[in-house]
């Protein structure tokens, strides 16, 4: 290399931003820790396909680590580990730090609801001797993606007497599954003229659930009767009980490695269980933090965070107020000094659809956890836009701790956009920034993430809450 070339190289190294594949920055030991971590994550994905199941799984893990259910008024001191279950659909957890609570909490937030098909309140009907369920989709989906594949059913049914039945059917290898039909190409001439958004319409998302009539009964709705009889025998429910039920149809397939190199994971519901699991794991692994750690796994992000289990409600604020008061302070003071990693997935650059992303400012698979200064649509509508100062603090921390990270926006300006819960937390006067894992095929029944990025999200939470 000539003297001039080596001088240019030196200058490039010094001045250019580095955007290397994370693989080059990890040693064998770290890579095997990464792969081992992802095996546990895959199990979590399979056991927690809905917000209710994610709460159940999280609570079991918390209790195993000595977290106690917190009741308002309980005394607290440094080292205490507590959690609060919000209606079985969201969960909050905290570890009391050694610093005074007035110095604020380190808050991690992620959501555990994912796009899916909910059953309507009168779902069951018979049409030409087939039994079907009517659905109402939840969150932003491309409807055509949900046909012609196996679906499982998850949720709860509250019976007329107030008792509750939990339902999970379609996950065990011996279980039946369910399916939405699509039209055969031979007869789809008219359907094929519809645009992609209309390809399958909301009222066409009907799930096939049976086809045999009840015994020798040839009267009308005998197939429906037979299904109701099966449900009565199995769950003790009648048709009216669907009114007080929350039943969710989700893809029946399991999380699997993707690629010959097994570098990625394909699964339903990475958005946002990938951030929920990593934030939860970092919290479970945290011992004696300086600042009080609060992690919230919330519901209803996919529909706009409204409702009492979504982050527009006051449940997070109340939890922090309760902790503040138990430690002799008040919620306002604590929240105002707090810092938050608001964790949600981001769109990864897709070589097949490169035109929607701006290459200098999008997230890439394998380049680590993605830090996003602002989200929103058009002129940053609906974002909290983290301050340069807070971005600077997070950047310094991640670099110091050798966390592999990148920055990325959700697509090109004016291409679309989307928000996260960051704005609602920032509205509580908390310094908040978006972080998350880049995802391919986001909101599809089968989404893809990189193992390196999953592990780096875990590490980002771990160093943030320990700082
Ligand atoms: Mn999300
Ligand atoms: Mn989403």
Image (cartoon, rainbow, N blue to C red):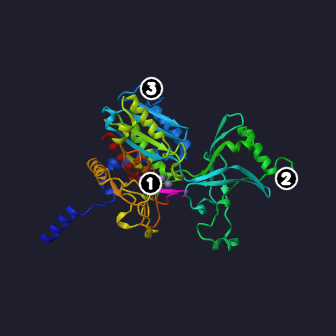
Mark 1 secondary-structure assignment: loop
The residue positioned farthest toward the left in the image shown: 3
Q: Is residue 154 above or below residue 370?
A: above
Residue 44, disc? none
Question: Tag 3: Cα neighbours inside 10 Å, few (<14), some, or many (≥20)?
Answer: few
Residue 272 appears in the picture as rendered: yes
Where's residue 205, x and y in %?
66, 58
Give the foreground label among 1 and 3: 3
Nearer to us in this view, 2 or 57: 57
Nearer to us in this view, 101 or 111: 101
Question: Tag 1: Cα neighbours inside 10 Å, few (<14), some, or many (≥20)?
Answer: many
Say whether residue 443 is magenta.
yes
Query: Magenta stretch?
Result: 442-452
CA gap, disc 3 and disc 2: 59 Å
CA gap, disc 1 and disc 2: 48 Å
Q: In this view, does 98 lie to the left or right of 413?
A: left
Q: Is residue 333 above or below residue 410?
A: above
Q: Residue at x 80, y 56 (%)?
A: 129
**Which residue is tagged 2?**
220
The residue positioned farthest toward the top in the image shown: 75
Where's residue 141, x and y in %?
56, 59
Question: Tag 2: Cα neighbours inside 10 Å, few (<14), some, or many (≥20)?
Answer: few
Ligand 1 within 8 A of label 1's CB? yes
**Which residue is tagged 1?**
345
Give the foreground label among 3 and 2: 3
Q: Which of marks 1 and 3 is nearer the N terminus?
A: 3
**Which residue is tagged 3?**
74
């Amino acid at each position: 290399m000539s003297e001039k070339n080596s001088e240019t190289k030196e200058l490039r190294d010094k001045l250019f931003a580095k955007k290397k594949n994370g693989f080059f920055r990890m040693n064998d030991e770290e890579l095997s820790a990464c792969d081992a971590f992802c095996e546990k994550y895959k199990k979590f994905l399979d056991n927690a396909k809905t917000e209710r199941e994610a709460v159940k799984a999280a609570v079991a893990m918390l209790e195993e680590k000595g977290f106690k259910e917190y009741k308002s008024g309980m005394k607290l001191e440094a080292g205490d580990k507590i959690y609060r279950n919000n209606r079985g659909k969201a969960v909050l957890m905290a570890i009391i730090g050694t610093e005074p609570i007035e110095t604020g909490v380190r808050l991690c937030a992620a959501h555990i609801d994912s796009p899916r098909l909910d059953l309507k309140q009168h779902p069951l009907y018979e049409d030409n001797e087939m039994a079907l369920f009517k659905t109402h989709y939840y969150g932003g989906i491309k409807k055509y993606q949900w046909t012609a594949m196996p679906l499982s059913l998850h949720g709860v049914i509250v019976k007329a007497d107030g008792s509750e039945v939990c339902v999970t059917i379609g996950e065990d290898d011996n279980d039946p599954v369910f399916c939405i039909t699509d039209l055969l190409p031979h007869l789809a001439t008219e359907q094929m003229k519809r645009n992609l958004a209309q390809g399958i319409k909301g009222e066409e998302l009907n799930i096939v659930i049976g086809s045999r009539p009840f015994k020798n009964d040839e009267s009308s709705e005998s197939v429906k009767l037979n299904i109701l009889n099966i449900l009565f025998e199995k769950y003790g429910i009648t048709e009216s009980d669907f009114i007080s039920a929350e039943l969710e149809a989700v893809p029946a397939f399991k999380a699997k490695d993707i690629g010959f190199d097994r570098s990625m994971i394909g699964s339903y519901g990475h958005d946002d269980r990938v951030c929920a699991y990593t934030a939860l794991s970092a919290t479970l692994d945290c011992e004696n933090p300086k600042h009080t750690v609060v992690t919230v796994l919330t519901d209803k992000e996919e529909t706009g965070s409204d409702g009492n289990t979504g982050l527009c409600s006051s449940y997070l604020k109340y939890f922090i107020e309760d902790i503040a008061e138990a430690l002799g302070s008040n919620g306002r003071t604590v929240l105002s000094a707090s810092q938050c990693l608001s964790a949600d997935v981001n769109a990864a650059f897709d070589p097949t659809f490169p035109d929607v992303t701006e290459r200098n400012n999008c997230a890439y698979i394998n380049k680590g956890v993605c830090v996003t200064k602002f989200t929103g649509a058009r002129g940053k509508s609906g974002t909290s836009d983290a301050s340069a100062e807070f971005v600077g603090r997070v950047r310094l921390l991640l670099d110091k701790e050798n966390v592999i990270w990148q920055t990325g926006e959700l697509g090109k300006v004016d291409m679309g956009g989307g928000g996260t819960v960051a704005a609602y937390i920032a509205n509580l006067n908390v310094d908040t920034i978006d972080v998350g894992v880049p995802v391919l095929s986001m909101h599809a029944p089968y989404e893809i993430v990189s193992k390196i990025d999953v592990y780096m999200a875990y590490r980002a939470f771990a160093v943030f809450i320990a700082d």
